[in-house]
Structures are given as C-alpha cells and as structure tokens.
Amino acid sequence: MEYIIEVFLDDYRLEKIKGSAVEQQIEAVFGGELKVLRVKVGEEVKNEVLKAFESARIDSRACITDTPVAFRRALFEEIAKQKSLSEEVVKAVIARIDEIKELAAKESEYLPPPEIETD
Amino acid sequence: MSEVYFKRPMPHGGKLVERVISDKKIAKKYVQACEKYGAVYDIKPTLHYKRGVPVRNVYREIMSVCYGFFSPVEGSMTSAELESVLTKRRLLSGWVFPYPILFDISKEDYKKLGVSEGDRLLLRLKGKPFAILDIEEIYEIDPEELANRTFGSPETNPEVVREKFDDKHPGWVIYRSHQPIILAGKYTIINEPIFKPPFDRFWVPPRKCREIFDQKGWRTVIAHQTRNVPHVGHEFLMKNAAYTGDVEPCHGILVNAIIGVKRRGDYPDEAILEAHEVVHKAGYIKPERHMVTFTLWDMRYGNPLESLLHGIIRQNMGCTHHMFGRDHAAVGEYYDPYATQILWLKGIPSYGFDKPVNEVEGGLLIRPQNMKEFWYCPVCKEMAYSDSCNHTKEKEKLSGSLIRGLVAEGVQPPTVIMRPEVFKIVVKWWKKFGYPFVNEKYVQWKEEELEVDLPDLD
C-alpha cells in the first residue's frame, strides 16, 4: 500500500522551490486555498516513521499525520535540497532521526502561537 | 396523528439517578460522622501503570454517576455487577451498560484505611469533603484481566475487533492502571464542586438539560458527541444529521463534549468547549437551535462500547437522536471503522447484542442517526456528503490530523476547513498553555487543577 506525507507550503517555502521541478508538482486543494506537496512512501518507510514518533498516525486518507513539526520542517528542507518528492527524501530525514527527535522533544513543551488577535 | 411525533425518551433505567446532597447542615453531619466513626480517603489521579502520568481521575466518574449522566448506575460496581457488565454488557438490573465503573485503591491504602463492608468512607477532593461511599463489598481485581475483558479481542469479538488491545490504547491503559482493591457501593456527593470558567457555563446535568429542552420547546434533539474542536466537516455533520427528526428536522442540536484526560495531540478541553460555542456565536448554526454542554469522563476510546455510553448519557439528557459517524470515539485501528454503526444497526452478538441496541431488552430508546462522511468537493465547490456527491476521485477529505498539522506549523486553516472564529479560540488557549494541543505539561497541570474547586462546608 502507498502512504502519503503532506508538506504544506507558505510563501517562504514556495520561494525556496521556485523554478525547480518540484514546483510543478504543487497541488492546490480546498478550492485553491491551500498548497501542498505530497510525498509517497511504501510500507517499510511508513513503519519507520510510525516507530520513530509515538504521536504519528495514519488518517482516513492514508496520510501519515501528527509527526513532529521538526520532522516536517526537515522533510521540506530535504525536498528543497534534493528537488524531489521521491521516497529518498524521507529516507534522508530518517537518517537524521536522533537530531530530529531531540528537536521534537523540545517542541512537545512549547510551540510559539501565531500573532493573531484573539480577544 | 400524534404517533408521528417522537416523545422524549425516559432516562435509561426509568429514573434519573440524583445522589447529591445540597443541604450543608446535613453534609456537615455526614462529614463529622465519617471523621468520628468512618474513614477518610483523599482522591488521587490514576497514574499510567508504566509511565506514571495521570490517565484518569475517579472524581469525574463520581460526578457523572451522582448527577445522573450514567443512570441507572449509582456507584462503584459490585463483583457480580462487574461480571455481568464484562460478560453481557448489562447491569444486574438488566439495563445495558458498557463499562466497569469502579472505585479502586491500592493494597497499601486499603490497609491504612482499615475499612470493611458496611462502612462509610468520606472521599475528599483537593483536601476538602466531596462525597461519601457506602461500602457494600470489597474485592480484588487483576487490572490486566479487567482491561482485556473490558475491550475484548479479535478472538472473542471477531465481528468488530481487528487488533489486540495494548498499551497504545488509552482506554485499555486506564483499566490496566486501576489499583487492585475495589470498594463497591453507592456514591453520594455531599459538597457540590464549583466549576471554574469556562466549564461553569457548559455544565448542564440531565435534569437541568431536560428542563432547558422544555423551556426551549425542543421536542426532538439530536446529540453530537465531541472530543475535538469543530472543523467545517463537523459543522456540516451537525447541520445535516439534524435534518432527521419526526415530522420536521430536529428542533435542537445538543453538543456534549467529553471532558477529562485525553490523548496527546487532542485539543485542550477549554478550547473544545469554546470552539463549539463560537459555532453558534458566529452564526454558523443559530444559537436558538444549538447548545453546548459536557460530561466528565476520561475517554476509553472504545468505539462501539463508547457509543453505548454516549447513547446512555444523551438519552438521560433527554435527546431523541444521536449522530454516529465513522470511527466513532476510536483510536488506532483496533476496531472496524463502522463498528459503532454495526452495533446500532445489526448488533454485535459477542458483546451481548444479538439485535440492535434499541431492540434488545434493557436497551436504549435514543435513536441512532448513522452518518458516513463529509468531504470538500472542488467540483461542487462545497462540503459534500459522501453518499450524495459522486466526485469521488476529486474529493478532498478533511481530517482532524490534517488540521492539527496546519495548526502546529502556525498555518491558519482555510475557511472551508476551519472557521476563522474557531481558529481564534484555538489560538486563545494556545497562548495560555504555550501549546495548541494536549501535552504532558497540560495533563499534569489539568490533573492538579481539575475542572472544579470545592467550597468550604463551614
């Protein structure tokens, strides 16, 4: 079975992949309001991601979700570096798993809230 | 003609349980008698049997029992009642009930207390008198056996259980983490806790809820179970499921959130309640038709079993209908995604239901409204129901996980996924807790603070 890891794109990330082959693979979803890259992985890589992160799960769309922000950030960096959406980008991130787990441990305590008015 | 109108169902078991003493003079007498002749026990959270973090607080069960949410249950179950629940999902009285409700203490505490059958135990919460437990029976359990039998297994419940339950399942962990000594008997609250904001404005026990339905003129009410902040898919589920009713759509939509210890990654309870409230405050559903409430319960994530408890709670609150979706109150892949709907449409014999829940003796009167899913359809350009919209290739599924991913990265979800007012509520509580979701720090803080304070009896 094939599983998907989604990487959402904001303006900063869009700039990073501008002009690359990956830019052609951007998908616009939800009426064009959200831009996303989709990395497809097989059973083995899916299991490695689930094993690495207790929070990770598979949702009803067969997407691997609830991975730490540090993992998704590293995944985007790898996509931008390799200019590819192949399974290899995930494998490259898994190779740095200790470093990512350390960052993920810190982010489980605190995540900066967005600067929007809430009152 | 009157036959076409649905009547509000009676409470499960025929009568609402109300075991709350609000007269302080009487309460003080109980306290004095317990301090003189009985024993006193300070309620503590149940800790994870391996990791030592809070997974449950029995005070929530005592509240739900004494205010009637779990009617006809009146207290901690005796060994015979426990056996009946585990084998047949029935109380000894014959009424359907899915889960063991137990007051558990450690062997050390049992020795220290020195109580025996027939004694009265004063239960303190946050150091103040809270409730009494009239001990009818004391017995020992094996927590692992309790956990396994509570949920079943692929071998014993092959119709719906897909994987063996283990320590990744929060409900299994709760029962596995129970202490081995059970004090069985009826609870009575003698000092009513005071809910802190924002919980105070959503606390509507069954009797009060039924009165409010009368005042609002709601003949038919559909219940919406939640443990999540609402995304637009939830909103459409509520709006569309409410088209059922009798001769007209349901008059009311009752959101009833489950408040208690949750999984890491769920939203804080405070955000869940206020985010549902803002759905009507911002006008996405008329406030005249939508009401937000909660029940105290540390979720067991038992899919079909949890749906039984949800049906019981909301029937007791006076609802005529209950919406059930895919993966109802589920986690992981332990159950068939439609296990709840199978239970309510056909029954699950291995759990004691050879017929649907509404058709068995001692069953429920609340009607199920089984729904499939809503997705965003870029062709229809709207939120669409999966059994109506035929753009199955183009569909874009919403999931809580997708939204959590956006939120964690600080990306505001598009309006078609999450209303901006709902996102603002998420951020409001994010600013308070330094984190948008339940994490270890929140769980620890929550279990020290709880949702309530206890007043002085003097």
Image (cartoon, coloured by chain):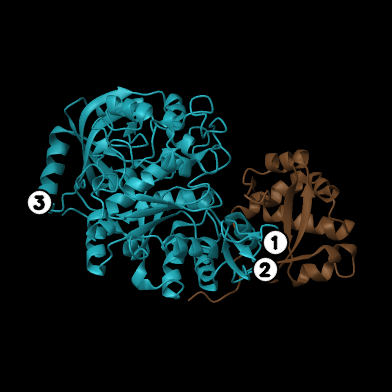
Q: Circle 1 marks a residue in which chain? A: B
Q: Percent from the top left, x then y, of residue B316?
A: 28, 50
Residue at horizontal 48 percent and vertical 34 percent from the top: B172
Q: Which chain is cyan?
A: B
Disc 3 target residue: B25
CB under 8 Å between callouts 1 and 2? Answer: yes
- CA distance for labels 3 and 2: 67 Å
Point out which mark residue B379 bears: 2
Task: Please tell me how many numbered marks the rendered image carries.
Answer: 3
Can I make out residue A111 in this image? no
Residue at horizontal 31 percent and vertical 61 percent from the top: B220
Q: Circle 2 marks a residue in which chain? A: B
* Residue at the outermost front position: B1
- CA distance for labels 1 and 3: 66 Å
Q: Secondary structure at mark 3?
A: helix
Give the quadrant of residue B347. Answer: top left
Q: Share a chain, discs 1 and 2?
A: yes
Point out which mark residue B394 bears: 1
Structural crowding at the residue carrying mark 1, measured as other residues with C-alpha within 10 Å and reported as few (<14), some (14–19) or many (≥20): few
Between discs 1 and 2, the one toward the N terminus: 2
| Pick the front one: B294 or B152 | B152
Q: Percent from the top left, x then y, of residue B361?
A: 29, 35
Q: Secondary structure at mark 1?
A: loop
Q: Percent from the top left, x then y, of residue B257?
A: 40, 55
Q: Amino acid at mark 1?
A: Glu
Q: Amino acid at mark 3?
A: Lys
Point out which mark residue B76 bears: none
Q: Circle 3 marks a residue in which chain? A: B
Between discs 1 and 3, the one toward the N terminus: 3
Q: Amino acid at mark 2?
A: Val
Between discs 3 and 2, the one toward the N terminus: 3
CB under 8 Å between callouts 3 and 2? Answer: no
